[in-house]
Image: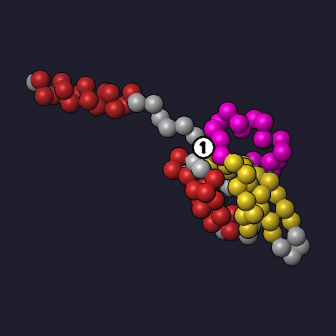
Amino acid sequence: MPRTLALAALMAAALALPAQADCYADYKAKQDNPLRLHYGVMQVSDGACSPRAAQAEIAPRLAAQGWTLLNVIGVFGPEGLSERKGNAGAYFLRY
């Protein structure tokens, strides 16, 4: 019985841990023939919450849609979404 209680307490503690924060990146991308540019905001995994790591995650996602990543401007949490939504337009959380 004490072992069961200890296991239950351990599981309850694990479930009470806060979830990791969401991570987002803003970036610039292009398409050729004709040249098209866009600024966008994309959610990235928590493990990619640095500009360099975000670049590795964003580039293939954009390439699958015919875009080439030019650069990752920065990474931020959910608190930065509202200020970027207007500038990203149709490319806000699109990919």
Quadrant the N terminus occupies: top left
Q: Nearer the viewer, residue 50 or 5?
A: 50
- Predominant SS along the magenta part: helix
User: Is 19 displayed left or right of 16 in the figure?
Assistant: right
* Residue ID for mark 1: 23
User: Is 38 displayed left or right of 76 in the figure?
Assistant: right
Residue 84 position, x and y percent, is 78, 41
Residue 21 position, x and y percent, is 54, 37
- Residue 87 among magenta residues: yes
Circle 1: residue type = Cys
91 versus 19 height, above or below? below
Regarding mark 1 in the picture, which secondary structure is present there? Answer: strand
Where does the magenta region start and end? 75-92
Picture residue at 58% right of the left edge, 40% below the top: 22
- Residue 46 among magenta residues: no
Residue 20 position, x and y percent, is 49, 38
Number of numbered callouts drawn: 1
> Would you identify the image quadrant in which residue 66 lies?
bottom right
> Would you identify the image quadrant in which residue 2 lies?
top left
46 versus 72 height, above or below? above
- Farthest residue, direction right: 34
Picture residue at 75% right of the left edge, 63% below the top: 70
User: Is 17 displayed left or right of 95 in the figure?
Assistant: left
Quadrant the C terminus occupies: bottom right
